[in-house]
Image (tube, rainbow, N blue to C red):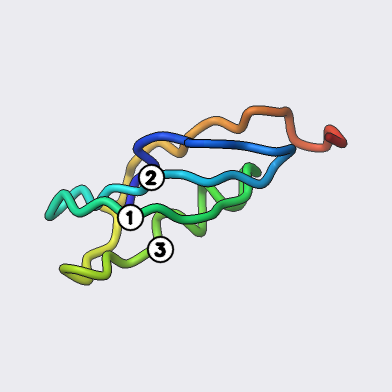
Amino acid sequence: MLIKTIVSQYRRDFRAVYECEHCGVEKTGLGYDDDNFHRNVVPKMACESCGEKQKPGGEPRATRYPDGMQV
C-alpha cells in the first residue's frame, strides 16, 4: 500500500487514503508521521483485496516534522 494523500493531520497522527499499487484499491486509514512508520510499516501493509504488499525499493515519504522534534 502507498499513501496517496493525507486527509488530515494533528501533530504526528494522521488520516490518509492508502492505494494498492497492484490493483488500485483505495482504503482510508490511520498513520503516524515518523521515519519508522514510512520505512517499515507502510511497505508491509497488505492489500485487503489482492493481498499484495509494496514492491521493494520504493522511496519512503518524507515526514512533516524533523525526527526528534516535539510537536
Q: CA distance from mark 3 to mark 2?
A: 16 Å
Count of residue discs: 3
Near mark 3 (Cα within 10 A), the count class, few <14, some 14-19 or many ≥20, is some
User: Which residue: 22% across, 71% down?
Assistant: 51
Q: Earlier in the sequence, mark 3 or mark 2?
A: 2
Q: Of the residues shown, which amino acid type is indicated by label 3?
A: Lys
The residue where tag 3 is placed is 44
Identify the secondary structure beneath mark 2. strand
Q: Of the residues shown, which amino acid type is indicated by label 2?
A: Val
Identify the secondary structure beneath mark 3. helix
Q: Of the residues shown, which amino acid type is indicated by label 1?
A: Lys
Q: Nearer the viewer, residue 70 or 13?
A: 13
Query: In the picture shown, does residue 35 fall above or below 20?
Result: above
Identify the secondary structure beneath mark 1. strand
Labelled pair 1, 2 in contact (Cβ < 8 Å): yes
Which residue appears farthest toward the right when viewing the image? 70
Query: In the picture shown, does residue 54 fall above or below 50?
Result: above
User: Which residue: 74% across, 38% down?
Assistant: 11
Q: Earlier in the sequence, mark 3 or mark 1?
A: 1
Labelled pair 3, 2 in contact (Cβ < 8 Å): no
Residue 52 falls in image quadrant: bottom left
The residue where tag 1 is placed is 27
Give the image location of residue 13, x and y in percent.
Answer: 66, 46
Q: Earlier in the sequence, mark 1 or mark 2?
A: 2
The residue where tag 2 is placed is 17
Near mark 1 (Cα within 10 A), the count class, few <14, some 14-19 or many ≥20, is some
Give the image location of residue 54, x and y in percent.
Answer: 29, 54
Residue 10 falls in image quadrant: top right
Please state if 21 lies on the left or on the right of 38 as rendered.
Answer: left
